[in-house]
Structure formats: structure tokens, C-alpha cells
Image: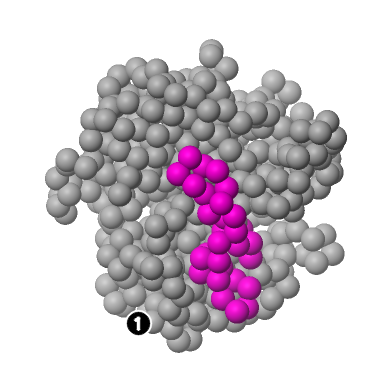
Amino acid sequence: MDHDDRYLHGPFAPVKEEITAYDLPVTGRLPADLNGRYLRLGPNPLGVEDPVTHFWAFGAGMVHGVRIRDGRAEWYRNRWVRSTEVSDALDRMRRGLQPPAFLPPSPNIHVLRHAGRTLALSEAGGLPHELGYELDTIGEHPMGATPDGSSANAHSKVDPRTGDLHSVAYVLGRPFAQHIVTDPAGTVTRITDIPLPGDLPFLHDFALSENFVVVFDIPLTFSMDAMRFRWNPAHQAHVGVLPRAGGQVRWFPVESFYVSHILNAYDDGSTITVDLIVAEGPVDVADPGGIKPRLDRWSIDLHAGRLEQRCVDDRAQDFPRVNDAYASRPHRYGYSAVTPVYGMQFTPEGPHPDDAFTNALVKHDLVRGTTEVHGFARDAAVGEAAFAADPSGDQNEDAEDAGYLMAYVADPGRGASDLVILSAQDFTGPPVARVHLPARVPLGFHGNWIPDA
């Protein structure tokens, strides 16, 4: 099984139906005061894909959600994000016709709440799509939109203290990116251009500290000939530091590297600390199974003009998360996932890990330098885990881990998935609850616990 084909099978295989189910069975006990929705977005191709041309990350976006209230799992829904092209393709399929051979990517990366709206986010320049409470698509929404055609995108981040939404947006064919600040009411209050020193890099994620925005100019650059991002060994890598208040970007040349995702960042005014997932090149983003990412801590000393890199955990992992109340501020704990997406060896039977460190969630204590691992069955693929603060917990500075981790985990025995809820403070203990879904949730990208107002 080559890499073009395996992302249509096993834990990646798309589902073909939209399902609504009520009063879901639960093993364990859901916290009675945990009220809201766990939502996660990811690619879910329509129709029959050609393995030769299929690119996993381009599939039509599908959101999967579970509504929890008063100790009950009230519903599960999965819905395609209905961009104009996806709506037209679904209509063709209802009439017994084949969908188009190629669909422009619809929002399929991330889903978050801002300015009273639930938004499905895209890579690069696509506008977010607003979702209703029950995951119907309301339509495109110009959240964070600028006159240059940028908008809130893949890894836009909400500062928990100011309520502002920060985005680093880029558009193919344009020699600059933009830092966009959108206030809690949804109004753009600041736009800062970020001139790029060379070819357009893959600016999938960025770091946000209290005073700075950090961008990563990596050697994965857009090729106009191939119309895709390709590893470019001739491209000098840089780390760029931009003051949040605007101004000039300061570039630090570094050795070639690939940045996957940011766990968190903070600063003391002169030194910025970034915890992030990185990998050695060359990297083919069409084949994430060939990437072995690790967790690093980078320190950027602005006074000395020096950047130091230190490996925290070299085991293959990704999708790092932090308690969002600590975003852009000093943090002690970080959480990551070990999934069949990254660093795996594949055979015709599917992905097989090279050691026991697989299908797991990891809790990093970045003060003590220790880790805890909550493992799942060898064939129980697990995705990103989002942090949900305990509404009745102690939220002072000593209780950063007062809350829960939520993730979809495959249950191959049922041919379906569970929403698994772990106690962040009893991380290796049995799950607090497992919500048994009526369908399988393919591996995907990012999501959030969105508490009810």
C-alpha cells in the first residue's frame, strides 16, 4: 500500500453518511456540570477518490460533534461543511450523479468559537464558514477579513485575557503574510504586513506570547509549477519575531527544520519561550506517515540575538494542546497525541508502530521534565485531545490541570468511535467517561470543547 492509497483506508477512511443520534450510551459518569459541545473538524472526501491524485488534507471538511448536558450525552452529529462546491457536489450525489473529480478545499482544519459564532477554519486564504449550534452550515463569514483578502485561518488563536482573536494569514502568490487582530465583537482592529524573505513558506501555525507573534519561515515552500508545497532545500529557514503592537519583523536564520504545530509560547519581555512540534526534513506533507515529529522547547533571546533549541521528547507525537486559559502565558503542562498519522510504518494491512508508544495521549510536566502516558489499544486510533476546564474546579495558578482531556478514539470492535474523557489530574487512571458513538470518526485535524454560554 503506497502513501497515496493508505489515507483512504483504515483509520483515515472517509465516512459516507451524515448521522444524528440522541441519548448516547455512556460508560462511566459524565461530570454533571460539564455543559457544551465537543467539536472536531477534518477532511472527509466525497465520492470515489483516485488514489494517485488524492491528497488527504484536501478532503471536504466534516465536523463531528457531541452535545453534553447535565451528565448526559444528548446527541452526536456529523456534517459536511457546506461550501458552495460541497453543496453542489452533495446535490449531484443525491440525484445519482458522480461528484466532480476535484473540489476546491473547503474549511477542514479547525473549529472554534469567537464573537458569538462557531467557525470552521481553512488553510491559507479561504474565508471561515459559520456553523449553527446543531452543525448546519450558515455560510461564509468574513471573520478577520482584510481588504487584501486575508481572514481568520487554520490556527487563529484567542487570547484568553483580552478576548482578541489573532491570525497569521497568507494567500498563495503573495509575497507577504498578515497578522490580523480581531476584537471580541468580531471587528478587525489591527493589520500588520509581514514581508517574507523568500518563497512563500507553509505558514500553517504560529506562536503567540503576551507581547510577540512568532512565525516560522520553513523550507516547505509553494511551487507554482507543481501547484503544491514542496520541500525546498535551497530555502534558508528563519524564525520571525513581530511585536504584537505592530512594527518590523526581526528574522533569525536557523538550520533547516519543519514546524508542525505550536503547543504554547510566553515571554518575559526579552526572552520568548516556545514549545512546539518540529521534525527534520525533507518533509512531504502529502505523506504525514513519513514524518517523525518531536516536542521541542525553543528560547529566543532578543537582547543577545540568539535562538536556542532543546528537544523535550523525541518520541513521535503531534497535535499539542494546553489549557487554553494559559495560552500566551507561562504554562507547566502540555498534552499531545500519538496517532497513526505521524511517524508510522505502513504495510498492506495498515499502520503498524515500531514500538509500544502508539495510540496514546501524553501529558508533559514541563517544570519537572516528566511525562505520563495514557495508552489505548494497538488498533484504537486516537486523535487530538482538547482541554476542557472543570467548571467547578479550582482555577487558581496551582490548578492548571484542573479539567479534562477529550478525544475521539476508534473502537474497531464496534466499527465505531468513542468520545473519551480523561481527568487531566488523574491522567493515567481509567477514563472518567466513554461516550459510545453510533459511527466511526476518521482521523482528522483540530477542534475544541465549546462550553455553553
Which region shows up in magenta? Answer: 123-152
Relative to 233, does residue 188 appear above or below in the rendering? below
The front one of 296 and 264 is: 264
User: What scheme was used to colour the molecule?
Assistant: one colour
Q: Nearer the viewer, residue 445 or 380?
A: 445
> Residue 361, how many percent across, how many down?
41, 35
Q: Could you tell me if residue 207 is visible in this image?
A: yes
Q: Is residue 39 left or right of residue 259?
A: left
The stretch drawn in magenta includes residue 134:
yes
Q: At x 30% / y 61%, what residue is drawn?
A: 160
- Tell me where residue 371 appears, x and y as whole percent: 32, 39
Q: Is residue 373 visible?
A: no
User: Under tag 1, what secondary structure?
Assistant: loop
Q: Is residue 360 above or below residue 248?
A: above
Q: What x and y, as percent, mark residue 188?
A: 46, 75
- Identity of the residue drawn at 72% across and 65% down: 222
Residue at horizontal 61%, vertical 46%? 81
Q: Residue furthest bottom?
A: 247
Judge the density around disc 1: few (<14), some (14-19), many (≥20) Cα neighbours within 10 Å.
Answer: few
* Residue 409 in the figure: left or right of residue 86: left
Residue 288 among magenta residues: no
Q: Amino acid at mark 1?
A: His
Picture mark count: 1
Residue nearer the viewer, 248 or 282:
248
| Residue 111 in the figure: left or right of residue 289 | left
Prevailing SS of the magenta stretch: loop
Q: Which residue is mark 1?
A: 303
User: In the rendering, at what x and y percent does residue 158 appear?
Assistant: 38, 61
Residue at x-position 67% and y-position 51%: 83
**Is the N terminus in the top left, top right, bottom left or bottom right quadrant?**
top right
